[in-house]
């Protein structure tokens, strides 16, 4: 009998991947599902980026590259990091991988020993705790309530730190809440971090181009450059440029940490796809109008989704400032009963009910560490969002 390694039995399959699989299954059975689980832009990759990839193939750029990528991609990443953080990075301070996901995983693999703690503010991206567990670390889940915008406060951060803390994770804008840390909120966290020189910070800024405020997203490094030698800024081209399938992520951080990550990368993958590297370089340095145009579309959908959900008695939805998700409070329907007599005891019961009764697929808040909520994605067309809201409303009205 096959027995997987303990690092596999310790972790879960990503709930969002599982939800997507369930939606595909139901569709294959002939059901029409209104799918609000999608974690990727519904736009196609812009043409100039595809063209750059085709041109790279034409030039024969189809071989291994250096572990840290082609000179063009390296330059593109260095420029991008400088634009986002206001700080200069050198080639020895960047790493690339098959998506931001793989970069983060490798960062944990390169730094965690058994028992090392990683502070994960909840609601969190579902992968963080399992990535920590797979690499023998101990996730320290720190609940952040809706009252603080689902964000970590200096007091809560200070209370979570111990002498075993290796990392603190920040994710701005956040998946699943769309919350964004302001400059002053980051300054407050930085003040605490300055008192704890052994703690590293992983700031996952993969959604930073998708924001609805007037100002660009602020990076922790921009607010507290003195922390730069212990902050790993992770990002990638998946979300901003609708390039999830190209699998290209990157990070900037202190040279010794980055060297450790790159040493592992050299044994794990050698390098990400050379063709995707050419595409990513074009994405980062080329025309940015796609980003502006897609954000305008996300904004319109966000406004429709938030207004529609808040109009439903029993649901409450804060306005997300970035990414393409909303985190909806469903506390008002917990304890009610479905038309066929089932009790809605928690958010998972409610999401199953929505799938059954309304054919709307969403993901339960318990998957992200804070209930009773559910996450919707608005990386889907306005008609689907409007139809979903009407179907959710009807299903909620049928509860007693
Ligand atoms: N970080 C967050 C918060 C995400 O939601 C995702 C994707 O869903 C990623 C990182 C990784 O994206 P990718 O591996 O496509 O770069």
Image (spheres, rainbow, N blue to C red):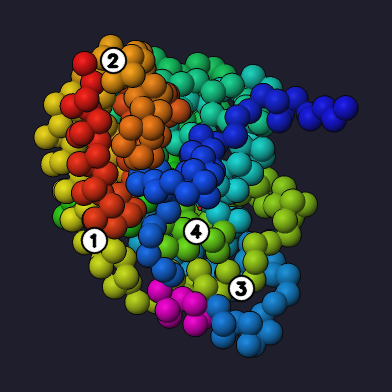
Q: Provide the secondary structure element on which disc 2 rests.
A: loop
Q: Which residue is mark 2?
A: 337
Residue at screen point 63% across, 88% down: 58
Whether residue 161 is situated above or below residue 326 in the rendered picture: above
Of the numbered discs 4 and 2, the one sitting upstream in the chain is 4
Of the numbered discs 2 and 1, the one sitting upstream in the chain is 1
Q: CA distance from mark 4 to mark 1?
A: 18 Å
Report if the CB atoms under discs 4 and 1 are less than 8 Å apart. no
Q: Which residues are magenta?
A: 46-52
Q: CA distance from mark 3 to mark 1?
A: 29 Å
For residue 319: magenta?
Answer: no
Residue at screen point 72% across, 56% down: 269
Residue at screen point 47% across, 25% down: 119
Mark 3 closeness class: few <14, some 14–19, many ≥20 residues within 10 Å: many
Q: CA distance from mark 2 to mark 1?
A: 37 Å
Q: Which residue is mark 1?
A: 297
Q: CA distance from mark 2 to mark 3?
A: 53 Å
Q: Which residue is mark 4?
A: 244
In screen coordinates, is 187 left or right of 269? left
Q: Which residue is mark 3?
A: 275
Asked which quadrant contains residue 353, the reply is: top left
- Give the image location of residue 358, x and y in percent: 31, 37
Asked which quadrant contains residue 138, the reply is: top right
- Give the image location of residue 113, x and y in percent: 68, 27
């Amino acid at each position: 009998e096959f027995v997987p390694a303990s690092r596999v039995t310790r972790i879960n399959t990503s709930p969002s991947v599982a939800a997507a699989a369930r939606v595909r299954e139901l569709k294959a059975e002939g059901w029409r599902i209104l799918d609000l689980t999608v974690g990727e832009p519904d736009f196609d990759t812009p043409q100039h980026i595809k063209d750059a990839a085709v041109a790279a193939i034409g030039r024969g750029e189809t071989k291994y590259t250096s572990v840290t990528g082609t000179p063009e991609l390296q330059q593109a990443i260095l420029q991008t990091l400088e634009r986002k953080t206001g700080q200069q990075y050198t080639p020895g301070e960047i790493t690339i991988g098959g998506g931001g996901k793989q970069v983060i995983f490798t960062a944990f693999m390169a730094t965690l020993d058994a028992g090392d703690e990683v502070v994960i503010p909840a609601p969190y991206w579902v992968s963080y705790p399992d990535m920590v567990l797979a690499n023998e670390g101990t996730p320290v889940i720190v609940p952040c309530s809706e009252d603080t915008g689902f964000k970590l406060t200096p007091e809560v951060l200070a209370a979570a730190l111990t002498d075993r803390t290796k990392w603190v994770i920040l994710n701005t804008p956040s998946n699943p809440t769309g919350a964004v840390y302001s400059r002053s909120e980051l300054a407050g966290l930085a003040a605490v971090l300055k008192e704890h020189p052994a703690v590293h910070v992983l700031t996952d800024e993969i959604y930073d181009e998708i924001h609805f405020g007037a100002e660009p997203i602020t990076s922790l490094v921009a607010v507290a450059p003195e922390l730069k030698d212990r902050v790993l800024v992770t990002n990638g081209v998946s979300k901003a440029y609708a390039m999830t399938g190209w699998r290209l992520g990157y990070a900037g951080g202190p040279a010794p940490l980055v060297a450790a990550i790159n040493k592992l990368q050299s044994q794990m993958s050698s390098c990400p796809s050379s063709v995707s590297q050419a595409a990513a370089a074009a994405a980062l340095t080329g025309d940015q109008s796609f980003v502006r145009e897609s954000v305008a579309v996300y904004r319109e959908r966000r406004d429709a989704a938030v207004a529609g959900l808040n109009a439903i008695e029993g649901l409450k939805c804060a306005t997300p400032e970035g990414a393409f998700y909303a985190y909806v409070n469903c506390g008002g329907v917990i304890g009610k009963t479905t038309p066929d007599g089932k009790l809605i005891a928690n958010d998972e019961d409610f999401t199953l009910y929505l799938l059954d009764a309304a054919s709307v697929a969403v993901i339960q808040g318990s998957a992200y560490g804070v209930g009773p909520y559910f996450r919707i994605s608005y990386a889907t067309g306005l008609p689907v969002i409007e139809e979903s809201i009407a179907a959710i409303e009807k299903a909620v009205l049928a509860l007693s």
